[in-house]
Image: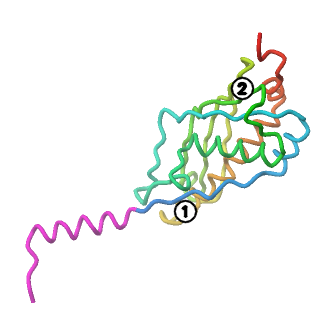
Amino acid sequence: MPSMDTKQIGLAFVALALGACTSMTTPHYDVGFESNTAIKGMAKSVNIGNFGEPNEYVSMCRGVGKITPPEGVSIGGYIRNAFIEEFKAAEAFEKSANITLSGSVEKAEFSSSKGLVGGEWNLSIRVVSTNGKTLVVTEKYEFSAGFAGVTACGETAVAFAPAVQALVKKTVTSPEFFELINSEDAYR
């Protein structure tokens, strides 16, 4: 039986270590009933611009793997796409609208071990309208994560979509949101 030299053993160890580190992809975004209803009730069309990335997003979960949005989309891109999906579903998305909403993700943090078996996403966005108005919205979304690392990190990835859904709902149902989509001040 041939023996392995030190270099081969080192390469085998690196391959094994890299194979243990996986990436957990968040689910695709689903339109929320309450957000859809709120947007339809506004009877206004908007365009959705870009959402900047958070200054820091630590994607590694317990050394098990990274939590990333699907198809290589960034955190800001995922949240932007969520708003687009919501406004399209409500038939209120229009690229040529008088108002464009854009913004930045101020915070995107998760914990997969809150209270040992719980988890939470902490999200914050700043939404800016072309009419000059700004709205900051934060969402603390709690979920059951589990104890084991792979399970807890998997649940954390799955919880990202409903956390963003809750963030979008909080944004479009905020009393101040109507000020963002009001085009009276858009050209002053």
Classed neighbour count for the residue bearing mark 1: other residues with Cα under 10 Å, few (<14), some (14–19), many (≥20): many
For image coordinates 58% across by 42% down, the residue present is 77
Q: Amino acid at mark 1?
A: Gly
Q: How many marks?
A: 2
Name the residue furthest front.
96
For image coordinates 71% across by 26% down, the residue present is 135
Give the label, 1 or 2, closer to the camera.
2
Residue position for label 1: 154
Which mark is on residue 95? none
Name the residue furthest bottom.
1
Mark 2 lies on a secondary structure that is strand
Mark 1 lies on a secondary structure that is helix
In the image: residue 38, left or right of residue 28: right
In front of the other: 179 or 97: 97
In the image: residue 139, left or right of residue 46: left
Q: CA distance from mark 1 to mark 2?
A: 32 Å
For image coordinates 53% across by 36% down, the residue present is 53
In the image: residue 137, left or right of residue 106: right
Residue position for label 2: 135
Picture quarter with the N terminus: bottom left
The relative height of residue 174 versus residue 79 in the rendered view (above or below) is above
Q: Position of residue 21 (x, y in %)?
A: 38, 62
Q: Amino acid at mark 2?
A: Leu
Q: Quadrant of residue 175?
A: top right
In the image: residue 159, left or right of residue 66: right
For image coordinates 91% across by 38% down, the residue present is 41
Q: Earlier in the sequence, mark 1 or mark 2?
A: 2
Residue range in magenta is 1-21
In reply to whether residue 14 is colored magenta, the answer given is yes
The overriding secondary structure of the stretch rendered in magenta is helix
In reply to whether residue 27 is colored magenta, the answer given is no
Q: Quadrant of residue 154?
A: bottom right
